[in-house]
Image: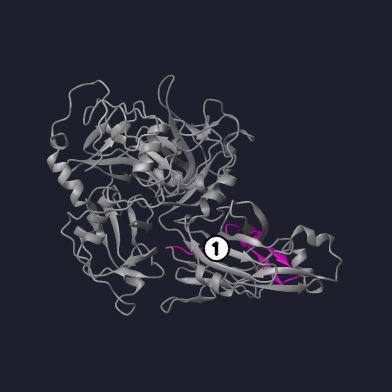
Amino acid sequence: MQPVSVWQWSLWGLLLCLLCSSCLGSPSPSTAPEKRAESQGLRFRLAGFPRKPFEGRVEIERAGEWGTICDDDFTLQAAHVLCRELGFTEATGWTHSAKYGPGTGRIWLDNLSCSGTEKSVTECASRGWGNSDCTHDEDAGVICKDQRLPGFSDFNVIEARVRLKGGSHPGEGRVEVLKAGTWGTVCDRKWDLLAASVVCRELGFGSAREALSGARMGQGMGAIHLSEVRCSGQEPSLWKCPHKNITAEDCSHSQDAGVRCNLPYTGVDTKIRLSGGRSRHEGRVEVQIGGPGPLRWGLICGDDWGTLEAMVACRQLGLGYANHGLQETWYWDSGNVTEVVMSGVRCTGTELSLDQCAHHSTHIACKRTGTHFTAGVICSETASDLLLHSALVQETAYIEDRPLHMLYCAAEENCLARSARSANWPYGHRRLLRFSSQIHNLGRADFRPKAGRHSWVWHECHGHYHSMDIFTHYDILTPNGTKVAEGHKASFCLEDTECQEDVSKRYECANFGEQGITVGCWDLYRHDIDCQWIDITDVKPGNYILQVVINPNFEVAESDFTNNAMKCNCKYDGHRIWVHNCHIGDALSEEANRKFERYPGQTSNQII
């Protein structure tokens, strides 16, 4: 999660604010809607958790004081105006009832009414600055389109490009900062509570509870941007603190800094509990619902319950990550609770509680009835975190015309396009886009296949066991997102190809060995391995996008799914291919949206 950017006020904006008595004057007592044109001196930011860079609770700084907007009369048109104030082209949605958590300080605007065409929120009608009868439980949020305005000058937008990674709870993790378009970590030298508090405040959490050193939240990868950060605690951004720009020799990722922030109490943990498990970290999920009548506890239908839903349940319970999301819990006694009160649960994985996930409203529909087929979880304080080495994909990509007589095994394992079935075997060839993929585990737990060894499938053709049906998706897309070719990577074998200097290999596929990727190690599929390709025989010359998504079905829990996707630009002239601008992090949402199909009777943000 990362808020939008931090810049100092422009001198001109500050002078206008000082000269304008209405900027510093007391709020108008009038309840009648009014319009003002005084956008100078205002600053905007997105805050709250959990969220993505283009969504969050809207906060405005006026007269040196940060405040929020009440959700009364809030509409998509108001969200459009605010998203443009924040530097985005438009809004795709808005939220109410403090979905991103309650803010603090003033509630600057209430009964905000916009047509959607205003250049500034100050042109919209409202009750007047600071005149509100709301509480922070009614704070409004926006979801902006992830597309920046061309030439947008964001002097009035708070920019933090700070984010937390690897934490098992909201408001904790490894500190990462953005510099020159590249994310990097912070060295823990002289890292203290004052610097940690600056980070927490940037992210909308308040002060820091703990400053962590020694890569307590896992080791990062790539650049280390800052060292010897010395903050007074009052800075608006970590970049405003005195610091040292370091070289690779100055610090290592074993010294990555982290934080634990103080969080506002939301009470979501009181509406969920586990029963029947062998420890407090596992069991059948029970949720509390109310009305009509007294509050009561009930079960969740196990249909379609998976890792993402289990991640939300474990987060709501305060138990970290989900090791497993279980659709059958016959081996756990449900006690006196036998009523199923929630069904159709589908989560994106970032929600704070299950009632924020889409689910059936009043009608409960389960394909399999009975307490044996209700949702359960096994939670853990640690999780793996996979990251594809995107630069290696770019460096190793090439085209090979491979004879059909050398592709019988690949055809047997469905590694060719459908048109290969009608080819004139064994004559002719298939055109393959080949590249290496090196997948690192940066998390705090080993990445292990979900299925046990007893269910691994032996493939005689290639002489190996498959421990996961699909480990990676490879797609060729048109610029507008239409898929024109695809490949897939079953986990031919998950093993530690290489590791960091201080880490020993644990997993090896030979002789029916254990499969997985150890923390601090990586699994390398070389470009010349069978099925490490996309069959592009039927692709016409043109400009395309290469998309790679690791763990696409979320079969194995990770601390961070947002870095599981990679995109590259491709130019194909019919003979050669150029792969460039490979980068991590913006394909997951598209992949998830294709899988997250709402069906009749399912609704978002339905309160249980």
Would you say residue 156 is visible in this rendering?
A: yes
**In the image, 308: left or right of 49?**
right
- Which portion, as a residue range, is magenta? 445-473
- The location of residue 107, given as percent across then percent down, is 24, 33
- The location of residue 442, given as percent across then percent down, is 44, 65
Query: Who is closer to the viewer here, 367 or 186?
Result: 186
**In the image, 569: left or right of 7?**
right
Q: Is residue 382 above or below residue 245?
A: above
**In the image, 427: left or right of 288?**
right
Amino acid of disc 1: Cys
The residue positioned 40% from the left and 35% from the top of the image is 95
Would you say residue 472 is visible in this rendering?
A: no
Q: Is residue 154 above or below residue 231?
A: above
Q: Is residue 67 above or below residue 575?
A: above
The residue positioned 52% from the left and 53% from the top of the image is 588
Q: Main secondary structure of the magenta part?
A: loop
Residue beneath disc 1: 568
Q: Is residue 44 magenta?
A: no
Query: Who is closer to the viewer here, 206 or 497?
Result: 206
- The location of residue 34, given as percent across then percent down, is 26, 25
Q: Is residue 459 magenta?
A: yes
Q: Quadrant of the C terminus?
A: top left
The colour scheme used here is one colour
